[in-house]
Image (cartoon, grey):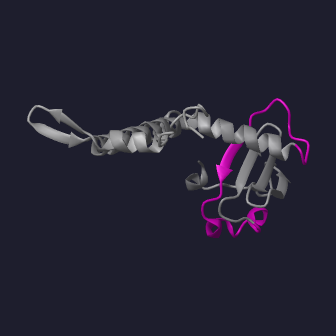
Amino acid sequence: MDLKSLNLKKIGRLRSPNLKIAEWLEKRLVIGKYSYSRKIILVAVLIVVFLSAVIVFSVIAYRASHTDPGAAAQKEIKKLISHIGGFMELPAGEQPTLATVADQEKLKGQDFFSHAQNGDKLLIYPKAKKAILYRPSTGKIIEVTNLTSGSQPVPVVPPETNP
């Protein structure tokens, strides 16, 4: 049999796409009297892009955290109100004051704070005369009291516990 009569084509060696990329990376770029490997240039560009992305992300995160501390406190108050509001009826029409227990040892003499821990949140409703001690770590309400003027002690939060 004759190969020409079978109409067979000569199959050449197929080149993989990875081989083309590898060959392209091995070539050198000549700028003036200097020669640079494309591989080195590609790595340098990737490093610059990565560092630029990290810097942009850091700047955005920094600005978001330092733009308005009052807005962050209002956001935390709304979050606490919605969470605690699922457990109990909260006073309507009043924005509470938020305090965070920073040093439980300073509050040990007061009955309201007998079970308080550092990091607990205190919501105070002055018009409704209510105070709620909430522990975010467990998601539980620790204590609730009515604020009264007169002979009964009112929970006092030291200035350093305010956010």
Secondary structure that dominates the magenta span: loop
Figure quadrant of residue 141 = bottom right
Left or right of 65? Residue 103 is right
Percent position of residue 16, x then y: 48, 42
Q: Is residue 106 visible?
A: yes
Say if the magenta span includes residue 125. no
Residue 56 appears at what percent x and percent y? 43, 36
Q: Quick check: is 114 in the magenta stretch?
A: yes
- For this rendering, which residue is in front, 89 or 138? 138
Q: Residue at x 73, y 60 (%)?
A: 137
Question: Where residue 19 appears, x then y in whole percent?
Answer: 42, 44
Residue, x 34% and y 45% (percent of image)? 43
Residue 71 at what x, y percent from top left? 60, 33
The image quadrant of residue 126 is top right
Name the residue at the left extreme: 33
- Picture mark count: 0
Q: Which residues are magenta?
A: 86-115
Q: Is residue 129 visible?
A: no
Give the image quarter of residue 80: top right
Camera-nearest residue between 19 and 42: 19
